[in-house]
Image: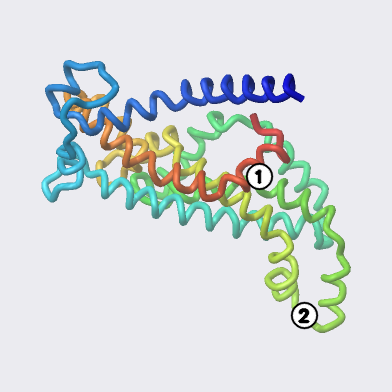
Amino acid sequence: MKKSKSKTILVVAVASLIALLFLLPLIFMIFTSFKALGEAMSSSALFPKLWTAENYASIFGISAEVPILRWLINTGIVTVGGTALVVFVDVLAAYSLARLNLPWKSFFLTVVVSALTIPTIITLFPMFYLFRQYELIDTFAPLMLVYSANTMGVFLIYSFLRGFPKDLEEAAVIDGATLWQILRFVVFPAIRPVVATLSVLTFLTIYNDFLWPSVVTSSDEMKTVTLGVANLVQGANFVNPGKMMAATVVATMPALIIFVAANKYFVRSVVSSGIK
């Protein structure tokens, strides 16, 4: 018993040390954001000698050189809109493949599964060319529409529905319910856990995406927060580490809050899908 307790303490100590190593960059980022310009440039100490919020005041001020609020609003529109679009399209597509007697259903299912093996980078230029043909570059449309073709979500919901009994749906048909009513009031409540998992994964994917926004946006007004903060490294703010860290902290908080609030759905999705 004593040996088992010592082993548990050792495992917890090692796990805590590893966790601290992973958290160290985040801790350094937060403390540096509260340093004045001179100290941030010259000192490598973890804790600030003189705490100041001037870096946050400078990025949230009316005449702020870093339009962090604009980038956060853009990210909110793109992330919420894109996630809602993915859920709507994926639920309809998965339900059609799992329940409806459609012609060529096996072929479409094969296409969905095959699409999972295609690297995203290969589709980058065709998508850019398509949106450019319709003059949609540097608008919200390409930032949201591109995520709607989420075959992983279709396959996730389809697999869930294949193991879900049809009894309730058949009872609803006998009661005279329409197809839309069955989907809305019978199927959707049953698949709510997997939809929540898909929503969390999609939200974090869109929020953290850097490559696609960097391809289809060119103006500061349309940048997302990840793109805007990354570009700070190349701009005049590079000489002000405190301001850069403050912008990074602000950009990190929304995704961190969502991750903590929906942690159980995220862990469940990793376990069920085998994502590493």
Q: Amino acid at mark 2?
A: Ala
Q: Quadrant of residue 92?
A: bottom right
Scheme by which the image is coloured: rainbow
Residue 238 position (above or below residue 59): above
Q: Quadrant of residue 46?
A: top left
Residue appearing at x 70%, y 73% in the figure = 185
Q: Nearer the viewer, residue 141 or 173?
A: 173
Secondary structure under tag 2 reads loop
Secondary structure under tag 1 reads helix
Q: Which residue is mark 2?
A: 177
Q: Nearer the viewer, residue 248 or 38?
A: 38
Image quadrant holding the N terminus, namely: top right
Q: Amino acid at mark 1?
A: Thr
Q: Which residue is mark 1?
A: 151
Residue appearing at x 52%, y 53% in the figure = 83
* Residue 178: percent from left, percent from top: 75, 78
Q: Quadrant of residue 188?
A: bottom right
Residue appearing at x 15%, y 41% in the figure = 58
Tag 1: Cα neighbours inside 10 Å, few (<14), some, or many (≥20)? many
Q: Are marks 1 and 2 in contact (CB under 8 Å)?
A: no
Structural distance between the alpha carbons of marks 1 and 2: 29 Å
Residue 60 position (above or below residue 2): below
Which numbered disc covers residue 178? none
Residue appearing at x 69%, y 20% in the figure = 7
Image quadrant holding the C terminus, namely: top right
Q: Residue furthest front?
A: 2
